[in-house]
Amino acid sequence: MDEWADTHLAMHMLQHVVIGDAAIALMVFAVRGPLLVFLLPPPVLVRVARARSFLSLLLRPRIAFGLWAANLAIWHVPYLYDLALRHQGLHDFEHLCWVGCGLLVWTLLIDPGSHRRLSVGGRIALAAAMFAAGQVLADVLVFSLHPLYPAYPGRTDQQLAGVVMMGEQLVTLGVLAFVLLRPRLRASRLVAA
Amino acid sequence: MSATQFSWEPAYIAVAVAGAAAYAWAARVDRPGRWRIASEAVGLFLIAAPLNSPLETIAAKRLLLVHLLQNALIADIAPVLVLLGLTPPMLARLTRLGGNRIRARWAILAWLAAWYGTHIAGFYNWALENGWALNVEHGLLIAGGLLFWWPLVAGRLSVPAALAYLGAGFVASSFLGLAFIFSSHPFYSFYEHAPRLWGLSPIRDQNLGGILMNGEQTLVFLCAIGWYVSRLLAEEEPAQSLQER
């Protein structure tokens, strides 16, 4: 995938949404409950505990979403995107940003430690906000009449990249919304019956 | 025929006038607020105006892009505005008159059938070549739109069910726009041979039409989803404040 990402924007986009969204969602989902406590070795856990107040700040819903959305917007500015393609160090940092910001929002969405920073409605709202922000980028890529990134001159490739973004978000956030809403859907069906 | 000349589908002027008259009659008993009247008026205007203006001339004789704009206006935006213009007693009356028989799962299927069915190449070309058939196409789209939005506006769905309904509608309807965007050959032979406008080739015309359709649907659905998410949050507020106490 990494090799194809050098020549195809759609593949590069798939790489980003996998490492920043789908993989993170699955990772966070996998460590729900007591497993979370045993995930990190004690010395690392101690350090994490020291940075607790900073992490709590980052995990405030508005801050986490703001960082995630800013990250999404900044790395898709053609100049920066191109620069990252030319400098491996910056490119690695970009991927790190995807992972970091993905971790923040998916921690809030899945709530692996049951901290209840957000209610179910709040989590649905965050998912909807992420989808809306992602749609803005997807629409720019799909609707743009000219290729935006010099390294990827194909317009169809760029439009496909937009669809990849849209499709991946629909799957990950759609599944999350369905899982969160399912108990309420059942309850409303029972009330109706 | 000049592109700026008016074309007419008088049936839809009659539909809009009849709708306005019925609304005025119902409003004698149950007075709607200003925004409901405005919503009804804009909704009825969006049914009549796109089909009775130069937009109709360009849509039926020149560009697919404008035809898709017309379809988006009459199938997506006008129906929801018309239904939002109705007061709760008006909705209750319509519910008693048969609205209670409209199940959400059938409504969404009927809307999708109208949406995809009317855009099948054979039907679309046939409708463009026969004036009355174009009326049928537009009628199906308006009826499909009204059916789709009815369960939502009439309050027949709980908030979670409404979110699921909107999500399903958004995903299921988006493929048509995407097909127009990514197609490399024109779907409709009628527009291949139609005189061009604004220098748009048939394929560019089709791609832009898909972009317009997709953009419009994204906007409408995200607004509706946003509204239901805010209702979901409002529903949770009393429970949360109880928990905090």
Image (cartoon, grey):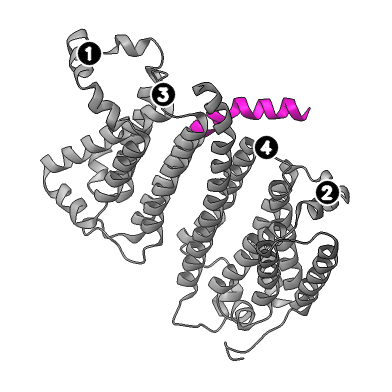
Q: Amino acid at mark 1?
A: Leu
Q: Position of residue B5 (x, y in %)?
A: 62, 89
Q: Nearer the viewer, residue A52 or A137?
A: A52
Q: Nearer the viewer, residue A175 or B181?
A: A175
Identify the chain of the residue marked 1, using the numbered disc in the image: A
For mark 3, what is the residue?
A111
| Label 1 to label 2: alpha-carbon separation | 59 Å
Rendered residue at 73%/25% (across/down): A190
Co-location on one chain, circles 1 and 2: no
Q: Position of residue A122 (x, y in %)?
A: 47, 34
Q: Amino acid at mark 3?
A: Asp
Co-location on one chain, circles 4 and 2: yes
The kind of secondary structure element at disc 1 is helix
Classed neighbour count for the residue bearing mark 2: other residues with Cα under 10 Å, few (<14), some (14–19), many (≥20):
some
| Label 1 to label 4: alpha-carbon separation | 43 Å
For mark 2, what is the residue?
B95
**Residue segment shown in magenta:** A175-193
Identify the chain of the residue marked 3, using the numbered disc in the image: A
For mark 4, what is the residue?
B158
For mark 1, what is the residue?
A45
Classed neighbour count for the residue bearing mark 3: other residues with Cα under 10 Å, few (<14), some (14–19), many (≥20):
many
Residue A187 part of the magenta-drawn span: yes
Co-location on one chain, circles 3 and 4: no
